[in-house]
Image (cartoon, coloured by chain):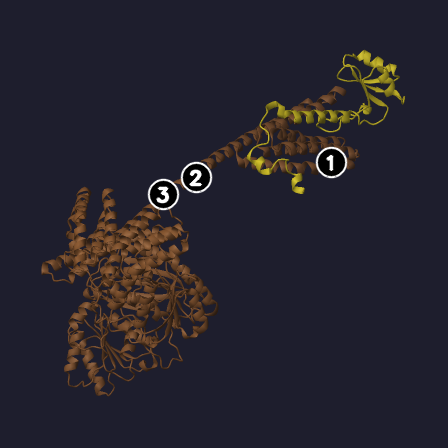
Chain colours: A yellow, B brown
Amino acid sequence: MLTSFFEPCRQHGELIRKPIRDDRGLRDLAPAAVLLAAGLLGLIVASLSAGERNGQYLVIAAPWSGFGQTIRLIMAAEGSFIEAGRFGNIAIAASSHPDFETHARNAGAWLVFPSPRLAGCLGLSTRTSEQ
Amino acid sequence: MSTELENLRARFGRFLVALLWLHVPVLGAVAWLTGFSVAGAMAAGAVVAGAYHLMWWRYGTAPSTRYLSAVALVGEPALFLYLLRDNSWQMDMHMYFFAMLALTIAWFDRRTLLVAATAIALHHLVLLYLLPYAVFPSEGNLARVLLHAAIVAFQTAVLVWLTNMVVESFERISRMGTEIVAKNAALEERTREAEDANRAKSMFLANVSHEIRTPMNAILGFCHLIQRTDLDLRQKDYIAKINGAGVSLLRLINDILDFSKNEAGKLQLEQRPFDLRASIRSQIQLVEADAAAKGVAVEMQIADTVPCMLVGDELRFNQVLLNLLSNAVKFTNAGKVTVAARQISLTDREATVELSVKDSGIGMTGKQQAALFRSFTQADSSTTRRFGGTGLGLAISKQIVELMGGEIHTQSEPGVGSTFIFTIRMPLHDDHQDNMPVPAPQLRNLRILAADDNAAARQIIGEIFRHWEMPVDLVASGAEAISAVEAAVRQGKPYDLLLLDWKMPGMDGMETVRAMRANPLLPRLPVTLMVTAYGTEKFAAEIGEVKIGAFLNKPVEPRALLDTISGLFASAGSAEPAPAEGPAAAPMVAPALRGLRVLLVEDNDINLEIATELLSDAGLQIDTAGNGRIACDLVAERGASYAAVLMDVQMPELDGIEATKIIRRQWTPEDLPIIAMTAHAYEEERQRCFAAGMNDHVAKPVDPAALVRALDRWLRPRQEQTAVVVPEPSTSAVAPRTDLPAELPPFGLEAALARVNGKTALLRKLIVNFGRSYADVAQNLSRMIADGEIAEARRVAHTLKGVAGSLELPGVQRLAADIERLIAGGELEGISGRLEALASEIAPAIAAAARLTSGTAATETAGRVATVNEKEVSAAREVLREQLQRRNLKARASFDAYAAAMGLAPEASNNHPVRQTLDRLDYEGALALLDKETEPSAATAERVRAIS
């Protein structure tokens, strides 16, 4: 029983004589690609959503939004602009309002997260609160 | 793809299942330590492990599984990195990426490595650079990410290089493996073909040798006969040379037969008890004459620990020893040959004995020794020219020794001599004491003197008597013997027995006896036993008026010696010389055994009569039984009164094998020996007899001497025996009657008479009975086969085979054997031809037998006898006509049958015009002559009737 747990569904001897499936080129890469994409996406989501609730938020607007639109969006949601991201649709906002996330989404933000702590290869990232 | 590589991948795939599932609890533990959701971490680990496990289960080691495993393996450090992101250990966890990347090499697939490297790069780029850079532009250290990427790329390159090398090596090994397997298969095929060819060659040699032996025996036999006729000196010389050449040729053929038989795996060793010392002694005696002629002394050194009785093939053992001894004598001039035996090991069941034959001859170089045991090879080619021989002797010896579970090797030095050493491993004989001849108590006190000029012969005789605990004095010449006899008489202790070698330098045995007779100091001479190595005929011619007690042939067999001494001193206390045992006397069992009762089981009247006469002549009392059932009843009723049972094998109602099995339920082989008497000469038949519990086997046609030897071997004197009636052997052997013609073709009267101890009346009766019993045997057999009485037909054919052998009708015997074999094998289609051949082959014998009853034996006249059976003649003529028309070579045999039916004497038959025409293979001419002869035959018949 335990042995069969580690075995492929086909007979071991058959497996040894010949690989179960022939090389089908890129199609063979599909399961790996799916797992890789899902894994990366999962990690991105997990990284972004693991911020502490300290009144600071990561606001992501529509990709075509500029800094002005993003700042207006933050202001409309009764928040204050703290720092611009690399792109015009990303910014860090602060708000003491408990419904800031809802308000910001209503104002046109696509995603609103409590401000994340993103680590690079070196280790801890710079805390936005410390800036 | 290499199987080895696939094996490795399969093992690694299995290992990854375990490894990835093991990460699940570790992830949970790390999450717990770092304050993350344990369930979430474990769920993420389970997704990774589950995804791989699913692919592995579904696709095994397929590329898709391998690629996915690369992502899964990289996923594990990525998860750890996420869980440790606020921790100082995060940086250290990067090393786990390299470990996992290195691990993927175990797939031995560079694409898997590249997938793993790509996954690491993407992870770093997206999560450790792009994401922080997107959110916090001041973050995202590209240089570091690039450094990591470069290291990963370098590691990947190294691993790809390594993978390629390993894969290439595996593929090369795989190709080599495939080639080796293919070459092995081809090699095996070639070896098998070579072995088949060798076996076929050996079988061919064996068959051809066997076929050549038959005519060779005839050549030698007729040489022997012609030497006994009046020949002038030149003719004698020619015949002697023909005989010598024939003997050499026969020896060579026998060697080839032995060798090829063994090569073909057909040489089988017998398993019978034999006396090792006696065997060695007898072989020494065989070479003694040659050794003495060359001035070579032969010595024997047998260690006391060597067992007396072993179970094995004595004949083959003797063959090996004789070959080595002959070689030793051949290659030694005026030196010494020593035969030694010592025990190497001994268990409860078997002994290993080492025998060596050492000579002080010419010796051999190392190169010569290396070629010794190969077939058709001698030390060098000049050896063949100088010393003769086939070069097969040592090869055969090696084969035999190896069959006996031993080995043979040689030690030699040129000019110093050679030693041939061989070992044999043989079972010990359990009750060896029973088989050793033991002298009667009254013989133990005899005073014995033996004279022989040969030291080895003296040693052998001395050992024999010492073994019997009988004192013996040994001297080396006739003159010394006379002095010793005189001295003994002077001391009042005269010798009772004197053993004299016939041929001695100075005064030979005969002269010694004459001198003793003429010696006035010797009023009473000891009983003299002459020992000769020169054959009885020559000895008998020289013996003349010299009165001696008996003579013995060399090699001296202990049993024969004891039998002779027992015979000479049979009447207790009498030292008078007994009459010499003439060569024509009927062979008798040992004196102590005479008067014993044996049960003879035989269904055929003719065989029964022969065996009864032989056993009666041998000094035994006989009860008879017609089949196995009667035999069992008789044994059950009075088995204790029988000393042995002589059992035919093929009998109606209950055959010999079954009867033996029944008897053996009550009687052990020691208490009641059963000796098979059967016309089967095959080893498997003999084995069947032994397996059923029989003690021995005597082949039919029975050789009286062989029968008596078998009886001597197995009969035991009865303790309670007091006044037994000893049947007197018939004296007809020395006074042949005249109621049988000198010749009666096709019966071989001379040999047949020997079988019945020279009893012409008995043989006549047997032939007449044969004529009556088997006149219509071919028709009867044909009818039986047609009626489905197969078993009965087989029995009749078997019996005919035995009877024809006894009456020396080899043609009939052979055909009967063929027919028996065909019936036994169920090959009834081709049997009619054989039956026809039997009818024509047996016809002359039946006709000859009929002539005996009519009182007109064949005469030497060229005319026809008066009692021609017209019907028989007509039948024989028709057979002959048919074969002449078909130009069949058998026509000559048919003519013989026809001539016999016509009552023609052999000379007339040979001179007959039809026969002479046939000899020229002129079938048309012979047919014309036969037809011409047919016309006046009616007139002849009328004349015949008028005469009668």
Q: Amino acid at mark 3?
A: Ala
Eye-nearest disc, 3 or 1: 3
Image height of B903 relative to B510, above or below: above
**Foreground residue among B759 and A23:** B759
Eye-nearest disc, 2 or 3: 3
Disc 2 element = helix
**Foreground residue among B202 and B731:** B731
**Foreground residue among B397 and A46:** B397
Q: Name which residue lies at 47% across and 36% down.
A: B178
Q: What is the distance, in whole Å, between disc 2 and disc 3 at their CAs? A: 14 Å
Disc 1 element = helix
Which comes sooner in the sequence, label 3 or label 1?
1
Residue B195, position as x, y percentages in the image: 37, 45
Q: What is the distance, in whole Å, between disc 3 and disc 1 at their CAs? A: 68 Å
Q: Name which residue lies at 37% across and 52% down.
A: B783
**Quadrant placement of the C terminus of chain B:** bottom left
Q: Amino acid at mark 2?
A: Ala
Q: Which mark is residue B27?
A: 1
Q: Amino acid at mark 1?
A: Leu
Q: Chain of mark 1?
A: B
Q: Which mark is residue B820?
A: none
Q: Chain of mark 3?
A: B
Residue A5 lies left or right of residue B678; in this view the side is right
Q: Which mark is residue B194?
A: 3
Q: Which residue is mark 2?
A: B185
Quarter of the view holding residue B555: bottom left
Residue B609 lies left or right of residue B29; in this view the side is left
Residue B335, position as x, y percentages in the image: 22, 64
Q: Chain of mark 2?
A: B
Is there one chain holding both mark 2 and mark 3?
A: yes
The reply to whether dot 1 and dot 2 touch (C-beta < 8 Å) is: no
